[in-house]
Image: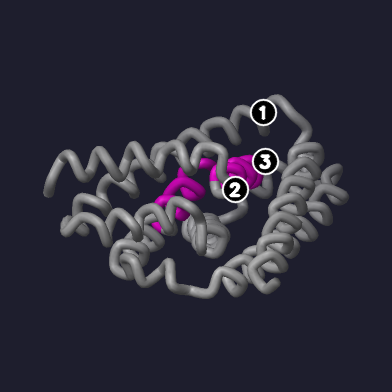
Amino acid sequence: MVLSVVLAAFVLVLPVELPDKTLFASLVLATRFPPVPVFVGVGAAFGLQVAIAVTAGSLLSLLPEALVSGVVALLFLVGAVILWRSANSGAEDADDAGEGKEGRSFLRVAAISFGVLFAAEWGDLSQLATAGLAARYDEPLSVFVGAWAALLVVSALAVFLGKNLADRLPIALIRRVAAGLFLVFAAVAVVETIRTLT
């Protein structure tokens, strides 16, 4: 393992992910579920996505951009609808918040978190950056360690921040804001799809 490549991957991926949709998705998951299984699921999803990006290397960038952005738009649209519907049932959720969190198994919450982040991360800038680094350097393990470490830092911040927000803000408000942001991400992805096709 080459420390300079680990550092390069970390420094490149961290700022790309800080303002990213996956940070917000982790935050929303942490407001809905206990933080530890969310972190485990998110970390595992990021690990698999980084492994795929490193393995694929520069081949990932050859996927049709329109296909990737179209799928991303659909995923965010579905996410927005789910979040909005759950916000409308926020009163019941607020009353049952403690019960809901305790009633879900660690494995189930980790699996839900894994699925959400694994799907959301496809075609992400950090995935493309990781693939580019893997293609540039002949150090796949170093690129993997650096990129995954950056993603774990971001997800830990989101899970911690998500827990604090859940303690201070109404859950329904957080879900509505999340739904709005997911709609914005969906609209951006639709525009990217149209731009790519024309």
Determine which of the numbered discs, if any, sits on residue 167 in the image.
Answer: 1
What residue is at 41 percent from the left and 69 percent from the top?
Answer: 60
Q: Is residue 29 above or below residue 162?
A: below
* Residue 169 screen position, x and y as percent: 74, 29
What residue is at 45 percent from the left and 36 percent from the top?
Answer: 15
Q: Residues within 10 Å of mark 3 (few under 14, many from 20)?
A: few
Determine which of the numbered discs, if any, sits on residue 98 in the image.
Answer: 3
Q: Is residue 75 visible?
A: no
Foreground residue, 181 or 41? 181
Dot in front, 3 or 1: 1
What residue is at 41 percent from the left and 45 percent from the top?
Answer: 151
Dot in front, 2 or 3: 2
Which stretch is magenta?
23-44
Q: Is residue 42 left or right of residue 112?
A: left
Q: Secondary structure at mark 3?
A: helix
- Comes first in the chain, label 2 or label 3: 2
What residue is at 67 percent from the left and 67 percent from the top?
Answer: 193
* Residue 49 screen position, x and y as percent: 40, 61
Asked if disc 3 and disc 1 are in contact, CB closer than 8 Å, the reply is: no
Magenta stretch contains residue 31: yes
Residue assigned mark 2: 21
Foreground residue, 174 or 188? 188
* Residue 114 screen position, x and y as percent: 49, 59
- Comes first in the chain, label 1 or label 2: 2
Q: Secondary structure at mark 1?
A: helix
What's the CA distance linking mark 3 and mark 1? 12 Å
Magenta stretch contains residue 190: no
